[in-house]
Image: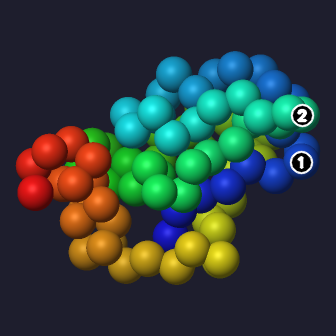
Amino acid sequence: MSLFITDECINCDVCEPECPNEAISPGDEIYIIEPGKCTECVGHYDEPQCQQVCPVDCILLDDKNPETKDQLMEKYRHLTGKA
């Protein structure tokens, strides 16, 4: 699954630079994650880096975008040109 940021986001700016896929960007009120670019850091790291640095734990799995680890790896390959 991709991840999403809840409205508990405090706009602290720590998650955006941690995303290896550049899936995180400022939204109108809070940061947002582009599901098409989010791989939960599969292919880059063992754990989602944005979740690791978030001080308020507002980055959760997005049940609206279910994906298996294999699908996330395929997305990673596509995004990085390693397909």
Residue at the image point whose x is 58% and y is 27% from the top:
16
Q: Which x, y percent locates residue 21?
A: 39, 38
Graded by Cα atoms within 10 Å as few (under 14), some (14 to 19) or many (20 or more), the crowding at tag 2 reads few
Relative to 43, say whether 80 is above or below. above
Which is nearer the N-term, disc 2 or disc 1? 1
Asked whether the residues under the numbered discs 2 and 1 touch, taking CB atoms below 8 Å apart as contact, a structural biologist would say yes
Q: Is the C terminus in the top left, top right, bottom left or bottom right quadrant?
A: bottom left
Q: Quadrant of residue 61?
A: bottom right
Say which mark, if any, is on residue 7.
1
Residue at the image point whose x is 10% and y is 49% from the top:
82
Question: What amino acid is at disc 1?
Answer: Asp
**Direction left: furthest residue:** 82
- Asked whether residue 79 is in view, the answer is yes
Q: How many marks?
A: 2
Dot 1 lies on which element? loop
Relative to 71, say whether 15 is above or below. above
Relative to 73, say whether 12 is above or below. above
For disc 2, the marked residue is: 29
Say which mark, if any, is on residue 46.
none
Colour scheme = rainbow
Judged left or right of residue 66, residue 31 is right
Relative to 13, say whether 65 is above or below. below
CA separation in Å, label 2 and label 1: 8 Å
Q: Which x, y percent locates residue 66?
A: 52, 79
Residue at the image point whose x is 21% and y is 42% from the top:
80
Question: What amino acid is at disc 2?
Answer: Glu
Graded by Cα atoms within 10 Å as few (under 14), some (14 to 19) or many (20 or more), the crowding at tag 1 reads few
Residue at the image point whose x is 37% and y is 79% from the top:
68
Q: Quadrant of residue 52?
A: top right
Q: Nearer the viewer, mark 2 or mark 1?
A: 2
